[in-house]
Amino acid sequence: MQQVPRIASRLRGLAMAELPPTYLAPSLHPSVTLSAIQTSSFSSTASVGANPRRDKSKNRGVSAINRTGPRTPFTVSRWPLPKPVSPEDMQPRETNPNHGLWGFFPLTGKHCLPQNMTTLMNECSMGSADVSNLGRPWTIQELREKSWEDLHALWHVCVRERNRIVTSDFERERIQAGYGQYESQERDKVVRSTMKTIKHVLRERWYAWEDASRMYKRGYRPEDFYGLDDVEVEQKGNGAAQAKEQ
C-alpha cells in the first residue's frame, strides 16, 4: 500500500480512479538492479567439465617403476582360451597313505584315506558327539616324568590336533552346520592347556640347567657330596667357594 502514493506522484496528479489496481502496484515499481557476480566452473577446460569421467591422459596408469600397464582393455580373440577339463575325464592321481599331511585331517581309522573330497569334508565336519569325546589335559606331574623326545612328540600331536580343530570349524562354518562350535572350543581349550603345561615343564628344566651350570662353575661336583644331606652340601659348597675366592 505504500507504493500507491509513489506511483501517483509519478503519474503527476491523475485521479485515483485512473490509477491501476492495488495488486498491480508491485509490477509498476522500478526493480532494483543487482550487480552481476562473475562465476566460473572448477575446470577451465570445457570438454573435461562436460565429461568428467573421461581421462584425457593416454599414459594414465602406466608406471615404469611399478611395472603397471595401461588400463585400456585389450582383446584376446586372436588366441583361443583354454577350456576346463571335466573332473570325469581327468586321470585319478595316486595318493600316499603314509603321507604326513593326512595327520591334519580327523579321519576315523588309522591310515584311512577318503574316496573323494566330499568324504573328507564330511569327516572334517564331524558331529557334536564325536567332538565331545575328549579327555583331560596332561598334568605337570605327568609331564615331568617324560623325556625330551616324548615332550617333543606330544607337542607335535597338539599342533596337529589344533590344526584339525581349525579345519573342522572352517568346514562347519562353510556348510552352516549349526552345531559343534561349543564342543570344538572345549576341545581346543584342553589342547592349549596341555601345550602350556609342556612349556612349564621345559621352563623348569631350563632353570634347573642354569642352576646346575652356575654351581659347576663355582666348583661343585656331585661325587664330592655323595651321601650328605642338603644342609651339609650347602655348607661344604659355601666353604669351597670361599676358599677359591681367597
Image (tube, rainbow, N blue to C red):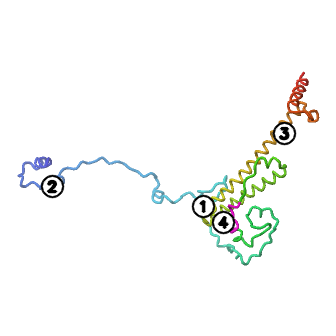
Identity, as a three-letter code, of the amino acid under mark 3: Trp
For the residue pair 115 and 51, the one nearer the viewer reads as: 115
Q: Nearer the viewer, mark 3 or mark 1?
A: 3
Coordinates of residue 17 in the picture (x, y in percent): 6, 55
Identity, as a three-letter code, of the amino acid under mark 4: Gly
For the residue pair 208 and 25, the one nearer the viewer reads as: 208
**In the displayed structure, would residue 223 be above or below residue 79?**
above
Q: Secondary structure at mark 2?
A: helix
First in sequence, mark 3 or 2: give its number: 2
Residue located beneath label 2 in the image? 23
Contact, CB < 8 Å: mark 1 with mark 2?
A: no
Q: Quadrant of the C terminus?
A: top right
Q: Secondary structure at mark 3?
A: helix
Identity, as a three-letter code, of the amino acid under mark 1: Arg
Q: CA distance from mark 1 to mark 2?
A: 65 Å
Q: CA distance from mark 2 to mark 4?
A: 87 Å
**Residue 127 got which mark?**
4
Residue at 15%, 55% in the rendered image: 23
Magenta residue span: 121-133
Q: Residues within 10 Å of mark 3 (few under 14, many from 20)?
A: few
Residue located beneath label 3 in the image? 209
- Image quadrant in which you'd find residue 241: top right
Q: CA distance from mark 3 to mark 1?
A: 64 Å
Q: Residue furthest right?
A: 223
Q: Residues within 10 Å of mark 1 (few under 14, many from 20)?
A: few
Identity, as a three-letter code, of the amino acid under mark 2: Tyr
**Residue 176 got which mark?**
none
First in sequence, mark 1 or 2: give its number: 2
